[in-house]
Amino acid sequence: TKSSVLRHLRPPAVAYAVPVTAMPTRRQVLQAGAIAPLATLAACSSGGDTPVSDADDSIRSQVTASENDLIKRYDATIAAFPTLAAKLTPIRDQHNEHLAAVGGDSAPTDLKGVVIPPTAQAALKELVVAEREAARERRASCVQASGSELIWDLALIATSESQHVASLTDGSP
């Protein structure tokens, strides 16, 4: 059936963006268009098992460190501004799924040393900047990676992190 074919096209254990309740903005459409060639590259590559390269291991380590840093930022922001928990917890949870997708381990969350701005609005702006940087890093990693599954996962993570920016800036809870 069509649904069983589509299910096989989606790699397992990859977090997708926060559900969209409104029409996408022009920016979101352009961001998705920027990722589409990378996803196509991953989809069109040989389906065979690709040996893991040292570069791929390095990319996985970088993504793991970056995702753990984002999780720490979200935890610290939620601790400082509990009213943002409903909005931030699903995004933080997706970063845990991103870790799992690249085979990374979650680091213990030590919130010491994490500096949070004095207002919730400023804290959200910092998270937006961090998400944009993370999405940029994932797109760059797609070009450096050699394994088709890793490329696919990185493209999906980059898309998810771009959607996080939209979710953090749209004003919804």
Image (tube, rainbow, N blue to C red):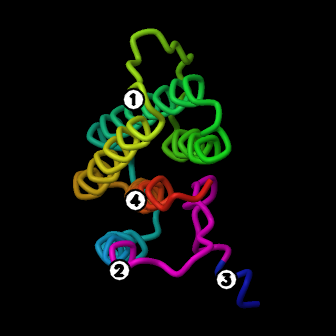
Q: Circle 2 is placed at which residue position?
A: 26
Q: Which residue is painted at 48% across and 62% down in the image?
A: 170
Of the numbered discs 4 and 2, the one sitting upstream in the chain is 2
Q: Relative to residue 97, is residue 52 drawn left or right?
A: left
Looking at the image, which is closer to me, 89 or 124?
124
Q: Residues within 10 Å of mark 3 (few under 14, many from 20)?
A: few
Q: Give amino acid for label 3.
A: Val
Q: Circle 4 is placed at which residue position?
A: 162
Distance in Å between CA atoms under marks 4 and 2: 13 Å
Q: Which residue is painted at 59% across and 23% down in the image?
A: 79
Give above or below for 73 relative to 137: above
Q: Which residues are magenta?
A: 7-29
Q: Which residue is painted at 28% across and 46% down in the image?
A: 133
Looking at the image, which is closer to me, 159 or 144?
159
Q: Circle 3 is placed at which residue position?
A: 5
Q: Residues within 10 Å of mark 2 (few under 14, many from 20)?
A: few
- Residue 21 counted in the magenta span: yes
Residue 99 makes an appearance in the image:
yes
